[in-house]
Image (spheres, grey):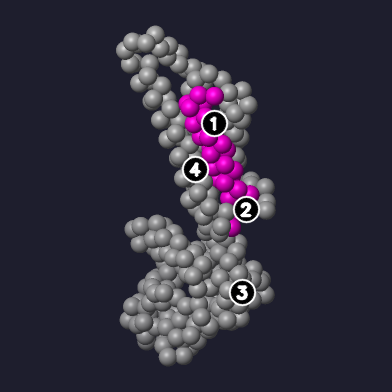
Amino acid sequence: MSQDSRLLSVACVAGLAALALMTWQLFDPRVWPVIVAMSVGQVLGTASFVTYGYVVLAAYRADRRPNTQGHVGSE
Amino acid sequence: MTLPTAPLAIVALGLAALSAVILAWYLVRQPPLVRVTKIWLLLGLGLFPIAAAFAGNVQGFEATKERTFCGSCHVMSLHRDDSDDIASNSLASRHARNPMFGSENCYVCHADYGMFGTVVTKAGGLRHVWLYLTEYRNVTVEASKSTIHLREPQKMNDNCMQCHSTKDSLWLAIPDHRAPLAEERAGSLSCASEGCHGLAHPFFRPARQASARLL
């Protein structure tokens, strides 16, 4: 598994955890579920999206780099 | 735990479900990072969760106005139970039976009504969480009656005056309203003091009350 795939897998797991935390408050709208959803949930969700952005940007830059070693980009 | 029925909550759940399906698909299939995969992940990690978070947060903020939310801290259970009691004659309960206040009566009476009122009120709510964690977590309900106090009691009359303007002729015709009018409007004499309309939460006795006219 490449580093990109590993990072994206971590992002997906973090994203799923964030979704679980963000939807918990909808079923149980008490103090702690709401606070956790709006803090930990948001942080995890943002981190997963930033990770995705980082991987896609890195892949884009790798594709644009001069192909001196016969490297084939991700597409 | 209840099934959400609010439209925004259902939208948030739908978007979260779509996002979860995409993320699970990626984790199971591990497809190569080609353009189609990037677009699906953009939906699954970006657009759908952001929209779900937005809808969920709006719904969450609405939930924080509910009496059940305020009463979910044990030290507020007496306040919640009194408002729930249809036989109670406390100011809080009587207002809770008014549809204009209803299940949001805590928020309607204790919110800040300034330009940034909602934000200020929610920031104040975070202070409540901090105080709960640091001071009130292990306080018994009985002890909370005499230790919980209003931070800015002089502001409470402003909230009463959101509805009771103190300018109506019928209201001004009552001598007990008219005589201390300046004090009432300034908030130095609480509408909810024992000589006037009584404590909003009669079981509740702030520690400072004995030496102050303010609730």
Residue stretch in magenta: A1-30
In the rendered view of the protein, which quadrant contains the C terminus of chain B?
A: bottom left
Mark 3 lies on a secondary structure that is: helix
User: Are the two marked residues, 2 and 3, in contact with CB atoms closer than 8 angstroms?
Assistant: no
- CA gap, disc 4 and disc 2: 20 Å
Residue B188, compared with residue B112, is above or below; it is below
Q: Chain of mark 2?
A: A
Three-letter residue code for mark 3: Leu
Residue located beneath label 2 in the image: A28
Q: In the rendered view, does B4 fall on the left or right side of A22?
A: right
Measured as percent of width and height from the top left, residue A72 is found at 43, 11
Measured as percent of width and height from the top left, residue B111 is found at 44, 64
Residue found 45% across the figure and 39% down from its top: A47
Mark 1, other Cα within 10 Å: few <14 / some 14–19 / many ≥20: many
Question: Which of disc 2 and disc 4 is earlier in sequence?
Answer: 2
* A18 drawn magenta: yes
Residue located beneath label 1 in the image: A9
Residue B78 badge: 3
List the single residue furthest toward the bottom: B211
Residue B129, compared with residue B31, is above or below; it is below
Measured as percent of width and height from the top left, residue A71 is found at 40, 12
Say if labels 2 and 3 share a chain. Answer: no
